[in-house]
Image (tube, grey):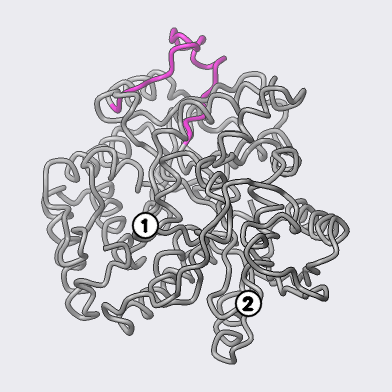
Amino acid sequence: MQAKGKFWAALISILMVLSLALTACGGSKNEASSSPSASDEGSSSASASPSESASAAPAEKVTVEFWQTAFEDSTNKWFKKYVDEFNKSQDKVEIKYTLVPGDAWAQKLKAAQAAGKAPEVYTMNYGGIANAAKLGQISPLNGLLPDSAFDDIYDNVKDFIKVGDKYYAYPKLVEPSAVLYYRKDLFQAAGLDPEKPPTTWAELLDDAKKLTAKGVFGFSTAQVAGDLGWSSWGLQFGTSGHQAVTNYWSKADINNDAYKSVFKFYQDAYQSGVMPKQQLAPYPDIKPFGEGKVAMQVNGSWAIGQLRNTYAKMVPNTGIAKMPSMNGDPNSPTATLGGWTLVVDSKGKHQQEAASFINYLLAGDPAIMIDFFKTSGFSKFSPRKSVDEAMKSDADASKDAWRAYIAEKIIPTSVAEPIYPWDISMAVSTGIESAMKGTKVDDAIAKAEKTINDFITNNKLAGTNPKQ
């Protein structure tokens, strides 16, 4: 939970920085040069990197700086373990590892880039890639990694790391933002089938009414703007088929029936009495469900780890399902995928060597990534097909039904997080919260629309989408 809170604090900080950077950079194009063409013979060894057949290997072992933003202790130890393993595995590249606290990351990296001393490889979340590529801060990985490494990535994740026709990052993990956790024992007691969780918003609210009893609310999800800002992204996209602004960020795109339906869903859920009047815990915290105060709670996949570690007694009575959509379409997105990648700095002198480390750690032997997913309690998920395939033969992973359900039913239909400035998401979520508290949906939409359009005008945002 603490790590997740730090993640969102860091993400919001990064989005705010991107907002300022975008207004400054206008429509300039990424000038990073293309790298030499790649061999398709993937290998986890630095000595087998794609360009070595075309250029002489370094005469001496080169040192590559690697900065990792701090995550939970188990993840930090995993990075350190495999940096050491990589350094021992070959005699051409020495990774110099630095762990940077999340709250110091943005300032430290910005200062290093300004001084021309940025690390040659570093962590970056999905939301930062497009703008960093547009600003020419990171290099395309085409040619630095084998083509087979990108072929291994699921199709709906490829777009997260791609700008134009080039890949600018390699993904480590994905985390769906919305999973429905529900109490099977309370379903049974209420006369509901515990093997048939709701699939539509109407079913969700009907079930929630039947589950609401003295001391137990039927349903819980985000209900304050700060949490609604990102946790509702999946429902916004799944219902409308687009994000809150036009593709070129020229104006708001929320004054329509689809967005009104999203606002109305949250309004009905809150005003029906099935939700607590005050949010019992921040959205990323499964505590209300774990303590038996709610019968159904929407939370991210990370809550699996919280349940297993902190509320283990609740696990046997817990079922998981995809967050319902408006009409029950199983292919409709209801979650976004957050997560982290590794990138290569565009000014680095040893880009091929930096990429060889990425190839070893994230794109090589599936066992390395399976080791990571075990440390997370299988609450985080692979963006690679070969890793998921290898998990079917792993004794621990193969018997984890929750892992399999999320990997097969939720992740394939989830979408990327928006990369527009956080102010836009807050305008929408402030409108949703206002509707929940009694403002008419049409009025809440109109106010959010004006706020977004004013922000676009005041910050000259139109035409600055780095993905267009």
Left or right, 9 with respect to 353, comes to left
In the displayed structure, would residue 208 be above or below residue 301? above
Pinpoint residue 379: horizontal percent, then vertical percent: 63, 38
Kindly identify which numbered label has been placed on residue 165: 1
Pinpoint residue 440: horizontal percent, then vertical percent: 14, 49
Instruction: Name the front one of labels 2 and 1.
Output: 1
Q: Which residue is mark 2?
A: 104
Left or right, 449 with respect to 78, comes to left
Q: Quadrant of the C terminus?
A: bottom left
How crowded pointer 2 is (Cα within 10 Å; few <14, some 14-19, many 20+) is rated as: few
* Callout count: 2
Left or right, 139 with respect to 73, comes to left
Question: Helix or strand or loop: what does disc 2 sit on?
Answer: helix
Residue type, numbered disc 1: Asp
How crowded pointer 1 is (Cα within 10 Å; few <14, some 14-19, many 20+) is rated as: few
Pinpoint residue 266: horizontal percent, then vertical percent: 29, 41
Pinpoint residue 142: horizontal percent, then vertical percent: 50, 59
Q: Quadrant of residue 467?
A: bottom left
Name the one closer to the observer, 415 or 369: 369
